[in-house]
Image (tube, coloured by chain):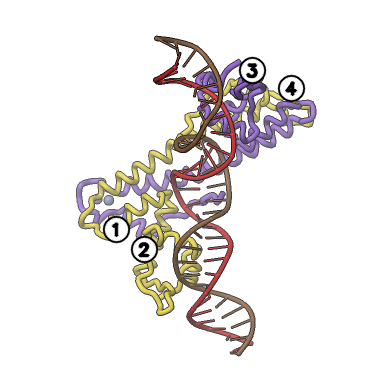
Chain colours: A purple, B yellow, C red, D brown
Amino acid sequence: MLKISELSAQSGLSAHTLRFYEKNGLINASSRSEAGYRYYNEADVRRVEFVKTARNAGFSLEDIAQLLSIRVDKQSHSCQEVTDLTRHKLHEVNAKIDELQSMQQTLQILLDSCCGGPEKATHCSIMEALDEGEIRDQARSKK
Amino acid sequence: MLKISELSAQSGLSAHTLRFYEKNGLINASSRSEAGYRYYNEADVRRVEFVKTARNAGFSLEDIAQLLSIRVDKQSHSCQEVTDLTRHKLHEVNAKIDELQSMQQTLQILLDSCCGGPEKATHCSIMEALDEGEIRDQARSKK
DNA sequence: CTTGACCTTAGAGTCAACTCTAAGCTTATA
DNA sequence: TATAAGCTTAGAGTTGACTCTAAGGTCAAG
Ligand SMILES: [Zn+2]
Ligand SMILES: [Zn+2]
Ligand SMILES: [Zn+2]
Ligand SMILES: [Zn+2]
């Protein structure tokens, strides 16, 4: 049985974060001391690790809540549900990458166009490009 | 002289956003009607377009505030200042791309490993992978 | 028995960039 | 003149994932 600070040290998640995850229904301590201190057993710890791993893979806390509800009753869920979640997340990640790569290109072009020296910015081609709006619009995600 | 709704239509930025930008010192209407309505002249409009272009390139509003302060007095600023800003932004964008590509890979591997069918998730290899934590940590940015 | 580290809670604050609301003027059209 | 559309302001709400605070109870070591 681990106290919250011990689980925190072991998992790398702060005690604050662990309590926050609990408040959001992701994890919980299956027992409490008389004084109300949280005590985590092995299953609790595994659940925390699952959350941590899923978070590292890029899933949002909401996604993780769904994955957890599958995890506790795998019988009632299908592989398809799991891949749907994963595929959806992958699409989001891909969209974000596209957006950022577009910015990357723009920024690189701007950077290449400018001398970067100590001269006055009166002739700066980056400022000119921004002034003239000659930059293709990025598809900025709205969410 | 444009009223805020006209500038909004022309720029594609909502009137709310234009007022928000003004509150944050990015833009402003150089004159007001007797009743207090904002009126934007050509220079105002160009400044708004500059903001819009810089935002499209990926700069934060804070970055843009700096770019604008250079823009109004190019004599007192150097190309280097401009490239520093741009390079810094590029680094941020690159870091974010790396992080997302790492997630992308992880998600793709997970997806490839799962049958995605209507079978019960008891044997799901995505769930297994998340359970076993066999996923390399992404370098998640903390900011 | 005291000190200090650790634990509890509800709830507030943070960040970025909006987005919206309420309450009340103003202006254009029918 | 009445109605609707448009403008003003200060200020609150949104999103996601924390992060921190205040006020107080608990526990082990010296
Ligand atoms: Zn130069
Ligand atoms: Zn330059
Ligand atoms: Zn399967
Ligand atoms: Zn599966």
Q: Is mark 4 within 8 Å of ligand 3?
A: yes
**Label 3: which residue?**
A41
Determine the secondary structure under disc 1.
helix
In space, the residues marked 2 and 4 are separated at their CA atoms by 59 Å
In the image, which disc is placed on residue B71?
1
Mark 2 touching mark 1, by CB under 8 A? yes
In the image, which disc is placed on residue B123?
4
> To which chain does the residue with label 3 belong?
A
Residue B21 makes an appearance in the image = yes
* Labels 1 and 4: the sequence-earlier one: 1
For the N terminus of chain B, give its image quadrant.
bottom left
> To which chain does the residue with label 1 belong?
B
Q: Residue at x 38, y 69 (%)?
A: B29
Q: Nearer the viewer, mark 3 or mark 4?
A: 3
> To which chain does the residue with label 4 belong?
B
In the image, which disc is placed on residue B47?
2
Q: Residue at x 48, y 32 (%)?
A: B140
